[in-house]
Amino acid sequence: MHKLLELKNGLNCVLAPLHETEAVTVLVLVKVGSRYEADKINGISHFIEHLLFKGTPSRPTSLHLTKELDSLGAEYNAFTDKDHTGYYIKVHKRHLVQAVEIVSDMLFNSLFEEKEINRERGVIIEEIKMYEDNPLMYIGDVLEKAMFQDHPLGNRISGPQSNLKTITREEIVKYYNKYYFTSNLMIGIAGNFTEAEGKVLAEKHFGRHKLNQIKDDFQRFSAKQNKLQINIEARDSQQVQLALGFMAYKRTDPKIYPLSLLAVILGGSMSSRLFTAIREKRGLAYFISASTVLYEDVGALYLQAGLDQTRLPAALKIFKDELIRIKQKGVFVPELKRAKEFLKGRMVLPLEDSARMIGWLLEQKLLNGKLEDLSEKIKKIDSVTVEQVNRVAQEVIDFKKCSVGFIGPLIKPEVFQKIFN
């Protein structure tokens, strides 16, 4: 069982004791990401994520920090998303005290030295190149640019290389001070510890900092799409990456449950409709997937495939035919039952891990504004009816509101327009 408590300074803290493990994870989430950024400083949230590992007064360099963490046998990392940033350390339970203190030191005492900032510019540019060189990882950015256009949600989390070269230390510190000393910061601990121990540590290292109240200041997205939107990134590659996106529901909408089940039925598993039709029956592609992406103000259904360009027209036609079929004829009781069991399994199994557990809990509180038990989530999945999934398919699958992302040898937009119009 988890417990939500408020520290003396107003900071939310989630504690989730799991005594069947020897590990413990400390995670801090900050409600800021690339959608909060002006175009001129796009990439700054991710930049700051890197810089918090570069030294504090008590650990002057990144080597001091990493040596200490390695001596604990820790797993540690950070991540930036479009709407939040996270920092975590996972250790054996006997090292919990050190883990909480180190995360706190990084969060509140980082130096942001000019020489480290300049050195890290090159590191992040290489990271950008790594993603760009992997079309399977990069296709999401290409699709979201097509979907969200000039809205901040269409910007890349890493930002463009040109921004990484020009963002100043002054801009970094100003942005950090605005978002990191606020009530939008949240700490969580999961694993083998006692609730009393967790509360004392959280209060000691996080409850003593003065935090400002801050309102969300990101630009809300309002979908006004009425025609196919296409973003093509020409690439001399043997395999092309194709992604389709349909606007859907925000993360707190009850319809996300039938939407998630629709995604499973379409392409979420190896027995799904698209996987069977495109890969198993015709051998047109190796990789097929369907998923949902959820933000506070909008969501989407994503479909993706990796295939040879010569097979693209055939695969596109099957995509369209399967989408029309599920929209017109709906889903069937047996496949919905299988999809429910699949979705519940994919939800339950990762939560055996302390890091996944605390991430799941903190994201709910940070982005949904409330916490739900796993049992509540499962009840909502089980309660979804065939009629609800069919209604969602009717609402979401609309080719006038479809977006296409494509990476591969140069192709004319007319290829997609001919199929989907």
Image: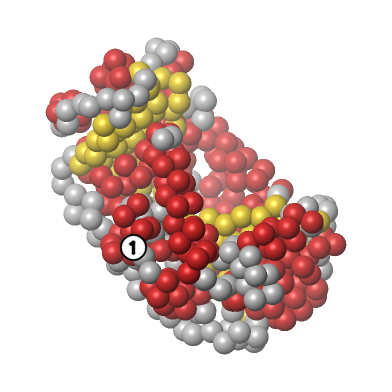
Which residue is depicted at the point 68% across and 63% down?
A: 65
Residue 349 left/right relative to 223: right
User: As shown in the figure, which amino acid type bears the numbered disc 1?
Assistant: Thr
Which residue is depicted at the point 76% across and 79% down?
A: 200
Place of residue 386 in the rendered image (x, y in percent of width and height, measured from the top left): 43, 39
- Colour scheme of this structure image? secondary structure
Residue 335 left/right relative to 393: right
Classed neighbour count for the residue bearing mark 1: other residues with Cα under 10 Å, few (<14), some (14–19), many (≥20)? few
| Location of residue 276 with respect to 218 vertically, above or below | above
User: Which of these two is toward me, 179 or 374?
Assistant: 179
| Location of residue 316 with respect to 13 vertically, above or below | above
- The residue identified by callout 1 is 166
> Image quadrant for the N terminus?
bottom right
Q: Quadrant of residue 191?
A: bottom right
> Image quadrant for the C terminus?
top left
Q: Residue furthest front?
A: 115
User: Which of these two is toward me, 29 or 293?
Assistant: 29
Residue 215 in view here: yes
Q: Quadrant of residue 108?
A: bottom right
Which residue is depicted at the point 42% across and 46% down?
A: 128
| Location of residue 36 with respect to 133 vertically, above or below | below
Which residue is depicted at the point 75% across and 54% down?
A: 70
Residue 16 in view here: no
| Location of residue 339 with respect to 197 vertically, above or below | above
Place of residue 168 in the rendered image (x, y in percent of width and height, measured from the top left): 38, 69
User: Which of these two is toward me, 274 or 219?
Assistant: 219
Helix, strand or loop under label 1: helix
Q: Quadrant of residue 155?
A: bottom left
User: Which of these two is toward me, 346 or 112?
Assistant: 112
Q: Residue furthest right?
A: 94
Residue 337 left/right relative to 230: right
Place of residue 182 in the rendered image (x, y in percent of width and height, measured from the top left): 50, 79
